[in-house]
Image (spheres, helix red, strand yellow):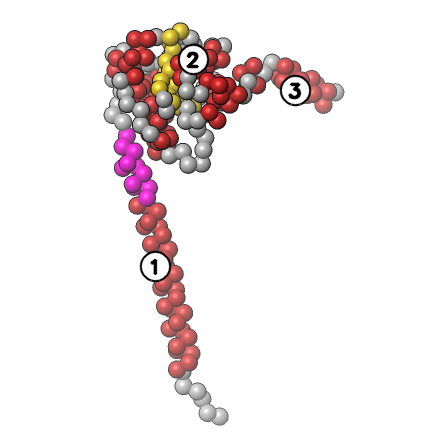
Amino acid sequence: MRLRALFVALLAACALAPAALADGDPASDTLITSQVFYPYYSNTPKPAVNRLQQTVADANKRGYTIRVAVITSPYDLGSVSALWHKPQPYARFLSLELAFAYKDRLLVVSPNGYGYVDRTKPDPAMLKVVQKVPIEKGTEGLLLTADKAVRALAAKSGYKLPAAASVKDGSGSSRDEIVIAVAAALGVLVVAGVEILRRRRRGRTAPQTIN
């Protein structure tokens, strides 16, 4: 009976799964519960991701509700790759996909431009605000661009956000820690090697006893 009840519950859960989870659009799945969507590649710069996530979190904490999708390639659009290079139509599409769970500000940042909607509706005035922010190249550049765009939108609406963390300082300190760790490991190996050579030399030069 318990197994039958569990089976029925699983069938019910599958039947009630949101349609957004089946449409193949990664951002619409992620932004249901997260405030930022970014490409999940192994080479995505973590310091830049952390900076954008912190900025968006700060904005939401201060009452400026917004979610951000950073789109770097058609792959990030999943089954709606036809909207590649069409950030404003995609922003509108994405807002409708999220409407059952989220209906506030939504910003899309892509290599060829921005998309912006508020409560699933375009907002030309605020779109012009972000269009003044130059779009930087590469994945890290787009993440940093999104950070600046969020700050520009928040400032235009009268919200002051904390100063942005320095990505270069953070990544530099990480590199320094790695260099120090590698140097320390090499130092241990050198000391161990020298000690082994000393022991071998002692063994060779030790006086032999005559019976």
**Residue 198 spot, x, y in % from top left:** 37, 73
187 left or right of 16?
left
**Residue 126 spot, x, y in % from top left:** 31, 11
The quadrant where residue 150 appears: top left
N-terminal of the pair, mark 2 or mark 1, is 2
Mark 1 highlights which residue? 187
Q: How much space separates mark 2 and mark 3, taking CA atoms? A: 36 Å
Which numbered disc covers residue 10? 3
Total marks placed = 3
Which numbered disc covers residue 75? none
Residue at 31 percent across and 24 percent down: it is 135
Q: How much space separates mark 2 and mark 1, taking CA atoms? A: 57 Å
Q: Residues within 10 Å of mark 3 (few under 14, many from 20)?
A: few
- Frontmost residue, 55 versus 7: 55
Q: Is residue 35 visible?
A: no
The quadrant where residue 18 appears: top right
Q: How much space separates mark 1 and mark 3, taking CA atoms? A: 57 Å
**Local secondary structure at mark 3:** helix
Residue at 27 percent across and 11 percent down: it is 157
The quadrant where residue 109 appears: top left
**Local secondary structure at mark 1:** helix
Residue at 32 percent across and 44 percent down: it is 175
